[in-house]
Amino acid sequence: MVTKQLKDLSEDADLRRADSLAREIFSDVANKWALLIIETLGDRTLRFSELRKGVEGISHKMLTQNLRMLERNGLVEREVYPTVPPRVEYTLTEPGRGLRATVDGMCDWTQKHLGRIEDARRRFDA
Amino acid sequence: MVTKQLKDLSEDADLRRADSLAREIFSDVANKWALLIIETLGDRTLRFSELRKGVEGISHKMLTQNLRMLERNGLVEREVYPTVPPRVEYTLTEPGRGLRATVDGMCDWTQKHLGRIEDARRRFDA
DNA sequence: CCGGATCCTTGCCGATACTG
DNA sequence: CAGTATCGGCAAGGATCCGG
C-alpha cells in the first residue's frame, strides 16, 4: 500500500518532469530563428558566415545564440578547424534532420496557402 | 526586347513579394504561443476561457493577441454568440488544420527525442 | 573568420483597470 | 465572459569592440 502510493507519486513526478522538459524543448525549438536556421542548413554543411548569408536578416548575435542552443540540444554538430583564420562548420545531426522534416512541412504549408492567407488578411483588415 | 525586360522585372518583383509575404507568415506562425494554441485547439471548438486553461501558462493578453493574429491569417474562425454573458468560440479552419498536422509532427518529434536531447544537454553543460 | 562581452534600444509581455 | 487600453519592467535583440 504505502510502497504503491510512493510508486504512484514518483511516477507522477516523472510524468511532470518529462512534461516540463518537453515544454522547454518546444520553447527552444518553436521560434522563428531556430526553425529558419534548421531549414537553411538542410542536409548541407555550412560555415558560420555562409549560414549568416543564408538566413536572411539574422544578426551575428542571434545566429551564435541559436546555434549554441541547437548544439546544446544535440540538433546541430559544430566542427572547428584550428586553422588561421579559424573555420567552423555546422551540420544537422540525425535528430536535427528529423525536426527538419517537420519544418519542411511548415514551409510547404506556407507556400501552399500564400494566396488564401493574403485574401483572409485583406478581408480582416477591412 | 524592352517588353521582355519589363516582364522579367515584374516577375522578379512578384517573386520578391511572395517571398516577403511567406517570411511574414512564417514569422507570425513560427512562435511558441501560436503553435501551442493551434495544437490545443486540435479539432475541437473551444471558448476563450477553455483555451486559456488548455494552453498552460499563457496570459490573457497573449491569448487574445495570438488569436487575433491567427484569425487575421484565416487559421482560426471566431464565432460570437451575442448572449449575456457573451460566449465566443474558436475553431481551426481548413488551412489551420493543415498547419496543425505539421505541429503534431513537431510534438511527436519532441516526445520521441526527449531522452536523447536530455543526454545531449548534460554532455554540453559539462 | 568566429565568438564572447558590453552597452543600449526596442518591443514583448504581465498586471491592472475599464467597457459591453 | 470576452476584449481593449495603458503602463511599466525586463528581457530580447542590434551595434560595436576586442580577443583567439
Image (cartoon, coloured by chain):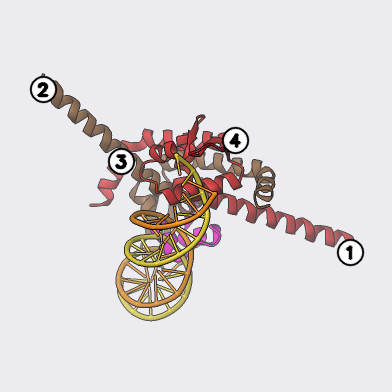
Chain colours: A red, B brown, C yellow, D orange
* Mark linked to residue A2: 1
Q: Which residue is mark 2?
A: B3
Nearest the viewer among B48 and A71 is A71
Spatial CA distance of label 4 from label 3 is 29 Å
Left or right: A64 in relation to A94: left
Mark 2 crowd level (few <14, some 14–19, many ≥20, 10 Å Cα): few
Quadrant assignment for the N terminus of chain A: bottom right
> Residue lying furthest top in this view?
B1
Q: Are marks 1 and 2 on the same chain?
A: no
Q: Which residue is mark 3?
A: B20
Q: Residue B40: horizontal and vertical position, in percent?
A: 53, 51
B38 in the magenta segment: no
Spatial CA distance of label 4 from label 1 is 45 Å
Mark 4 crowd level (few <14, some 14–19, many ≥20, 10 Å Cα): some
Q: Which residue is mark 4?
A: A93
Spatial CA distance of label 1 from label 3 is 61 Å
Nearest the viewer among B76 and C16 is C16
Of marks 2 and 4, the one in the foreground:
4
Asked if the residue under mark 3 is in contact with the one under mark 1, i.e. CB atoms within 8 Å, the reply is: no
Over which residues does the magenta segment extend? Answer: B45-66
Asked if the residue under mark 1 is in contact with the one under mark 4, i.e. CB atoms within 8 Å, the reply is: no
Q: Quadrant of residue D15?
A: bottom left
Q: Quadrant of residue B62?
A: bottom left
| Magenta-colored segment: predominant secondary structure | helix
